[in-house]
Image (cartoon, grey):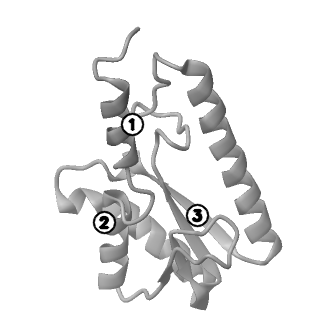
Amino acid sequence: MTDIVSPEKRSQMMSGIRAKNTRPEMIVRRALHARGFRYRIHVKDLPGKPDLVFARYKSVLFIHGCFWHGHDCHLFKVPGTRTEFWQAKIQKNRENDAKAKAALAALGWRVLEVWECDLRATKKQDYEPVVSRVSQWLELAD
C-alpha cells in the first residue's frame, strides 16, 4: 500500500509528534494536581525519564501512546508501509519500557502505566475513573 502523502510531508508530520506534554499527559497532570498531588515531570536522572515522578510516594507514572508503545488496543495498528521498520521500532520501545520498569523497581520505585486509549473520552468526567485509579494507587504508598 502506498502512502497518500509525499515522503517530505510525512516526515514533516511525524516530526511534529511530541514526546512530552502530550494531550493525555496534560489531562492526567491537571487532574492529579487539582487533587493535591505534587510531582516533577520528565526527570532525567531516573531510568526511562518518567512522565510524572511522585517523590513523596516513591512512585512514577508513565503515560504511553498506544501506537508508539504497541498497546494491544483498537488504537494500535502496524502501518502498511515500511512494516518491518515500524515493527522493529515499536518492539524496541517495548523493550526500553521493560528495562526502565525493571531498573526503577530495582531502585525501589513503584511504577504505573496509563495508556492513551484510557483517556480517549469526549467529556472531562469520563477521565474520572482513570484519575481515581491513579489517585488510589498513589495513596496506597502513603
Mark 2 secondary-structure assignment: helix
Displayed quadrant of residue 131: bottom left
- Residue 25: give its label: none
Q: Which sits earlier in the primary sequence, circle 1 or circle 2? A: 1
Residue type at tag 3? Leu
Residue type at tag 2? Ile
10 Å neighbourhood of mark 2: few (<14), some, or many (≥20)? some
Q: Position of residue 56 (x, y in %)?
A: 58, 91
Q: Residue at x 55, y 44 (%)?
A: 69
* Of 19 and 109, the residue lying toward us: 19
Quick check: 97 above or below 67? below
Tell me, yes or no, whether the two marked residues, 1 and 2, touch with CB atoms within 8 Å.
no
* Of 4 and 56, the residue lying toward us: 4
| Residue 91 seen in the current view | yes
Query: Cα distance, mark 1 to mark 2?
Result: 27 Å
Q: Which residue of the protein is positioned furthest toward the front in this rendering?
A: 8
Q: Residue at x 66, y 36 (%)?
A: 91
Displayed quadrant of residue 57: bottom right
Quick check: 52 above or below 22? below
10 Å neighbourhood of mark 3: few (<14), some, or many (≥20)? some
Q: Residue at x 56, y 29 (%)?
A: 86
Query: Cα distance, mark 2 to mark 3?
Result: 16 Å
Tell me, yes or no, whether the two marked residues, 2 and 3, touch with CB atoms within 8 Å.
no
Please indicate whether residue 100 sits to the left or right of residue 5 in the image. Answer: right
Residue type at tag 1? Ser
Identify the residue under disc 2. 27
Q: Which sits earlier in the primary sequence, circle 2 or circle 3? A: 2
Tell me, yes or no, whether the two marked residues, 1 and 3, touch with CB atoms within 8 Å.
no
Q: Which residue of the protein is positioned furthest toward the left in this rendering?
A: 123
Q: Which sits earlier in the primary sequence, circle 1 or circle 3? A: 1
Identify the residue under disc 3. 112
